[in-house]
Amino acid sequence: MMNMRKIQSRSAMLVAAAAAALIAVTAALGAAVAFSAGPPPPPAVSAVGTHAILTPADQHALSRFTTARLTGAEVIASTDLRAFYRIDNAGGPPCFATGGTGPIAQHFDIIACPSSFPSADHPLLDFTVMHNGAVWRSEGIAADGVAQVGLQTPTGVEDIVNVRSNTYEITTLPSGAVTAVVALDSAGQVIGSIPIDAPGN
Amino acid sequence: MKRFAVLLALTAALATPAVAQAGYWSWGYNYISSTTIQVESGWNYWYEGYIDKRNGALIDVGYNPGGGCYFSVTDAYANYFTPSGLGCGGYVDEYTKYDFGSASYLQIQAWA
């Protein structure tokens, strides 16, 4: 009689354990399905470029990078005077540059190898240059999903331009204080902000 | 006499900077922060600069502090730049300056 009760008790425990295991497996499968359908892919710079012909001075500039191995470049957008470059990095994610275009000795004005662009927190790689506290040139690279870029001034976001081939160039520049470059999505919502100078600097 | 000539030539070679690189300045790796606000190269015909910023918040990088021409760098970046590319060529003073936020660990270099 005692043995019969023990067997029944063990059977009940086995059934309970099997049920618990089944619930756990179901939950895990559910989580896996939710994960695979869940977070969006990280932002990218998907604009297709064309091979850039580099001068010896350009090659020399690339060789200055000691933490990256920069091997070549492609133009992802250009205007009459400015060009935007994606730089091939054999040692990691691509770098980017802005500079001149056409038959000039050196094309790159600034080359940047950022650790956090493109990302949800950093949708812009900004190359804005200041002269005497005022914006002198404002341009840069925008991640996929950024539709417009503008300048944050004390009175709001001004001089908004459309992003073209993952690049932006703000040609109408404010004479007053600018504290950030702002990224907007297609609905006009602010999705990122890059500080470019301290107020009162 | 021959030994003296060789010694003289060697001394002259060591004392004369290479023609291809008339000047070089480097600072770091070290921190700039609210206590070490700014470092600068001094004036020269610097023609290119490089900064390797490993962390920290906002800094300014450029030429001729107290006005001049500069760009801002957040987070961790490596940047190559030229005075002419920033619209500020000629006889210049390269610098980097702490702006706000956490301290930045970096190295900055200039070539003339």
Image (cartoon, helix red, strand yellow):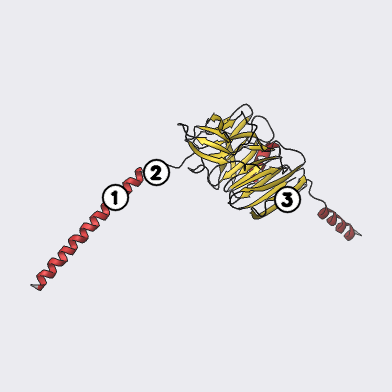
> Mark 2 or mark 1, which is nearer the start of the sequence?
1
User: What residue is disc 3 on?
Assistant: B25
Q: Chain of mark 3?
A: B
Q: Residue furthest left?
A: A1
Q: Is residue B30 above or below residue A179?
A: below
Residue A20 point in image, percent of width and height: 23, 58
Residue type at mark 2? Pro
* Residue beneath the point at 66% across and 37% down: A130
* Residue closer to the observer: A33 or A55: A33
Residue at the extreme right of the image, as rendered: B1
Tell me the chain of label 1.
A
Q: Which one is closest to the eye, mark 1 or mark 2?
A: 2
Dot 3 crowding, Cα within 10 Å, few <14, some 14–19, many 20+:
some
Name the residue tied to disc 1: A29
The residue under label 2 is A39
Q: Chain of mark 2?
A: A
Report the Cα–Cα distance between label 3 and label 1: 59 Å
Query: Residue A50's spot in the image, x, y percent?
Result: 55, 32
Q: Residues within 10 Å of mark 1 (few under 14, many from 20)?
A: few
What is the distance, in whole Å, between disc 1 and disc 2 at their CAs? 17 Å
